[in-house]
Amino acid sequence: MRRKSYTEDFKKMIIEVYNTGKPIKEICKEYGVSTAEQIFRLITAVELKKHIKST
């Protein structure tokens, strides 16, 4: 099965929605992300990129 890739804008939008306190299950359903694990990986990847750019 091919891995789905998301644009940087989509990732930022998901993180913004997550930061509002919206439940992960709702985010998955609304934006077509199949698992909560994908959202957590997405958040981790974007935060890591921010950290690397700031150093």
Image (cartoon, rainbow, N blue to C red):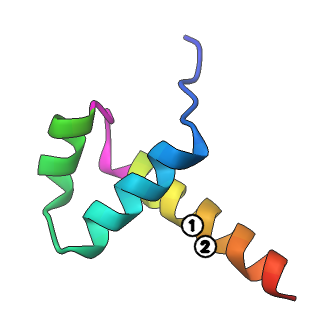
Horizontal side of residue 49 vs 17, given as left or right? right
Identify which amino acid the numbered label 2 is placed on. Glu
**What element does badge 2 sit on?**
helix
Which one is nearer the viewer's eye here, 8 or 40? 8
Residue depicted at 73% across the width and 68% down the height:
49
User: Is 54 placed above or below 44 here?
Assistant: below
- What residue is disc 1 on? 44
Q: Mainly helix, strand or loop, the magenta region?
A: loop
Going by the picture, which residue comes out furthest to the bottom?
A: 55
Which one is nearer the viewer's eye here, 37 or 39? 39
User: Is 45 placed above or below 2 here?
Assistant: below
Which dot marks residue 47?
A: 2
Tell me which segment is drawn in magenta: 32-37
Q: Position of residue 13 (x, y in %)?
A: 39, 54
User: Is 11 placed above or below 30 here?
Assistant: below
> Circle 2: is it few (<14), some (14-19), or many (20+) Cα within 10 Å?
few
User: Is 6 placed above or below 27 here?
Assistant: above
